[in-house]
Structure formats: C-alpha cells, structure tokens
Image: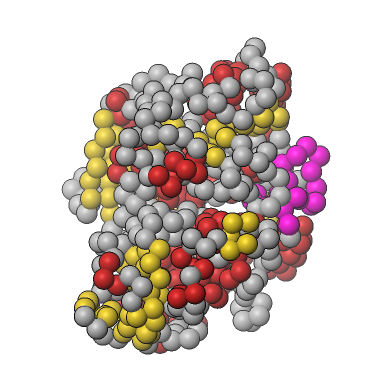
Amino acid sequence: MTPFISLTSIAIPLIRDNVDTDTIIPSREMKSTGKTGLADGLFAPWRYIDSAKRTPNPEFVLNDLEYRGAQILLAGTNFGCGSSREHAVWALAEWGIRCIIAESFAPIFKANCIRNGVLPIDCGRPVDPLFYSQIMTIDLAEQTMSIPSRFRLFHIEEENKTMLLEGLDAIDLTLKDGEAIASWRLQDRQKRPWVYL
Amino acid sequence: MKAAGRTVVDPSRVFAVTDHIVDTRPGRNDKTLIPGGQAFISETRAACAEAGIRLFDVNDPDQGIVHVISPELGIVLPGLTLIAPDSHTCTQGAFGALAWGIGSSEAEHAMATGTLRVVKPETMRVTFTGELQNGVTPKDMILHLIATHGAGGGKSCVVEFAGDAVTALDMEGRMTLCNMATEFSAFTGLIAADEVTTAYIKGRHFAPDPLPDWSNMKSDDDAHFVYEIAIDASKIEPMVSWGTSPEQSIPVSGAVPQNANPKSLDYIGLTAGRLIGGVPIDAAFIGSCTNARLSDLKRAAELVKGKHVAKGVHALVVPGSTSVKRKAEAQGLDRIFTDAGFEWRESGCSLCFYAGGEGFAPGSRVISSTNRNFEGRQGPGIRTHIASPEVVAASAIAGFITAP
C-alpha cells in the first residue's frame, strides 16, 4: 500500500451529517466483485441528475471544476454510516481522495479507510469553516493540518498512524506474529474447547 | 486472497451464505435479477468449495439472512468474537458475543490469520427500565434511542444494552434491539448472556453439548462505562421514521418536527408540522435481519388475519430464513398473509436494499420493517419509513401510516 506521509490539496466541503455508504456508492453501482471501476459511481445519487445517463448535477460540489484533482474531503458527523461496503472507500480513493476530515466517522468506514491508505481525521467537533475550499497541508508524522492562516493538531490512534505512515499491509504484519497466535490458540483450545468446531 | 497466495487458516470456523444477492421470488434459482448476481453466486460457490468453507447455498434448507441463521444454527455463542462483512453483525451481540461488522479487507485478514487488529473501542451502557406499553416493541426501543441521542450517538463504542426492559425480552427481541446498534454508530451492541440465552442455544446444530458455564459472561457489578444513558421504557410509543436517517424518527402519534432538515423533507415529500399518522403509503415490506423472525411474522399475522391490504398497496413478507419460512408455513401464517393480499416470498435480504434488480414502483412511499431509510436505499426516489412489523402490518391494511 502507498504510504501516507503528507499531502497538499484543495479541500472539498461536503458538510452534511450522516452521509451513508449507500449514497457514497449505491449497491447498483457495484457491478463486479472487484475493487475497481467505482469512481464513476461515487456519490451517483447526488452527482448526477440522471444516474443512468450520467448527467452531472451542477449543484453538487464534486462537479465544481475548482475541485478537480482534489484529495481532501471535509465532512460532517457520522460520515460513512450504514452498510459496511468497503467499495465506499475504494470509490473515494479511486476518484482521488486520500484524506477525509470529519466531525466524526462511522466505525466500520473508518477502519476501512485505514486498510486502504486513506487518512480519516476525526475532529470530534465541526470542521473549521476556515478550511472550506482552501489549499490544506496535512502532515501525518507531525499530526498537523494547516492553511497559511491556521494550524491545527489532530489526533490519530498510534496503530493506525503507523499503518498509514509505513503503508503496511495488515495481513503481512499479523502473519509475522503467527507463532504467538498459534500458541494462544492452543491454550484457548484447552480452556474453551467448545469454541472450536 | 488467492492473488496474494493466502489461504483460510481454519475453514471449520468460517461460514458463508447467499442472502443479499439471492432472488426471493417463489421458485427461485441462481438467476437473480441483481446485475452480476449470478456470477457472484457462482464465484462464491467455487471459492467456498476450494477453501473448504461451509456454504448455505441458494436452496439449502438452512439458507437465510446471515444474522438470522447464525443464531438459529447455534453458531454464535456467548463470549465468542464473531465478525462478518455486514454492518448488522451487531445483531448477534444479543448472545453476549462480541460480534461486529467489518469491510472486505478485514474479512480477508480474519480468514487468513484467525485474528483482527482492532483499536480497543470505548464503552457505553444504555439502560432501559420499566415495562413496555402494549404494542411497543424492541424496534421502537432502538428507534427511540437513536431519535433521542442521534445517529452518531453511539460514538463508536461497544454499547451494552441493560436493564429490566432488556432482560424481559426474548432472544428474537434482543436481536432486533442489537441489530440497529450500527444505526446508532456503535462499534457494536451486546446484551449479557443469561438463562434466556442458554435456553435458546441448547440443542441447536452447532451448539456445544453439554453447554459450558456462561454465567460469568456479563459486566462486573462495578464495571465503569465511559458513557451511560438511561431510558424509561414505559414512556416509549410505537415509532416510525419521517426522514432519511433513522434519527429522524418520531412516535406514530407525532408530527414531522418544525425544524426538520429541508433536504430530508424534500426527498421524503413531507412538510414540517404534518402529522405522520395518515400519510398514504404505496407499499409495505415485512422482512430483513431486523424484523423477519418467526415472532415478528406471528405478531404481524395476528394483525392482518381476516383483513385485506388497502387497495393499491403492494405488500410483501420475506421470511428471515428458510427455517422461519418452514415454521411459519407449518403454523399457517403464509395463508393468513396471502389471504390478506400479501406476497409470501423465499428468504433473503430482498427489498431492504436496491441493487439494480427487483424494486418498488418508481416514487413509491414504503412502510418497511427494515433498518435503513436512507435516500435511495430501497431504490432511486423510493421514500422509506421504517417501523415495527406491527406498524407495517397495520399500515398495509389501512393504506396509510398508523399504529395497530
């Protein structure tokens, strides 16, 4: 996975609460069992006046040319709620988003971000309106997000920070602890034989 | 996994089922109406066979919605960690298990390593006390909680549901309550195992025999929770959603709030201040991992017995599992529903969500025993109102939103 070190990009304000993964990528836009070909369906219900014909909705923020190539999305509370579909993160990442700054996230969506090299910044309060549509710089090692006139620290769990900074594959990392896991399982099997079918 | 050269570490503890993708029309086969669905089913079948994973296939007698069949088969047990790439896995927390939803990458991680890397969630306890009024159900309890504390109110915590109003519920009711912990943005929900839990599990196909002692599968008396919420369950009324988030729910006797979000109002086609009771509906759906177990269908059947759905209302019942369907048919519930004008379907997730296959008529307003009323959830432009099976059944007969 591509390590996440730092990033400078315009920030797209999509400040609406409870944006769900059905809206981020509707089931009907997930046309294969693969992880690709999803960017076109990203936010389809809001992005297109007619999803079938792909007629863009000029009112929707992602269609504003100002944000072409943007990598940062600003969001409200409980972003990514609903279905656990990882396609929501795949679609955002394929479109170009590498960092989402939100008042809060739904937990499954946040975990899916970490697994795909997308940095979720959980502010715990409304995103500062001064960041809207500004060129922001995110530095993960320093845990800072800034615009020339403002500078903020952000919180991230240590494990998640390491995974992103080093671009680690979670499975490879865990498999390194294979022996410890096997020995724990052996003990557990004796303590709770009923768990093992 | 194949591409990365990884294998399933212990296939005996992995199960698969066709539920979301499968067709629910009578006489079904692999030919689901969902685009790409048939390929998905055959790929799943091949992958399970290769890895040695037990698959509950399209016409298996134990097929059904994952969170209905796992308890039915005695797969979920107190004290287990259990994951599924489906957000409603929290349903199974009703058994005192730590059961939670994950994405595909984490599912792969779990199968390849037998573990998951999890940042320890915070804790919350929601205590419901008092006796529920007649006609009030666990669905109303959870909608009341989400409406009161918000769709983000669970703050990514492990939420324990406790209190005498919770312990008084049977296992099917407890599952309904835990099912919507994800709509509360909880990491998961759970309920301490007790004698009701063990009585349910005893004798089920994958359950241990004899059952181990699970009496310590509960929070310590002096356990500290980061957040505590207390709710007087006796004050809860039958609930229904008016908007496009489960937090936009009100008592059926209530009105759309004056300060309602204009975008939600615009989508749902209602005005602020309007009484929700009496809003005409086009369709009624009883199904889903929230409310399609035998007790749900029984209570709904009692309400529609000898009556008929209102003219022009498309009504259907989709049992949560093939086993639920068999038991319901043995009790004659299928006839009660079909005589009342409901369709009686095969088991699956069905019209709880729309994936380009079967859907409601364009622009329909649907009263639904499901868990999500998001924009477009049941199809583009479809306006969903979520409620208990009782409210769905009564509304189907009346032709408008109403409590029994």
Quarter of the figure with residue B273 = top left
Classify B17 as above or below B342. below
From the viewer's perspective, is A44 left or right of B245? Answer: right
From the viewer's perspective, is B389 left or right of B305? Answer: left
Residue interval drawn in magenta: B15-35
Point out the image quarter for the N terminus of chain B.
bottom right
Q: In the image, what residue occupies the spot 65% across and 53% down? A: B355
Q: How many marks?
A: 0
Q: Is residue B197 visible?
A: no
Q: Residue B166, image x and y in percent? A: 35, 34
From the viewer's perspective, is B286 left or right of B234? Answer: right
Quarter of the figure with residue B161 = top left
Quarter of the figure with residue B313 = top right
Q: How is the image coloured?
A: secondary structure
Q: Residue B171, image x and y in percent? A: 46, 35
Of residues A99 and B316, the one drawn nearer to the viewer in this rendering: A99
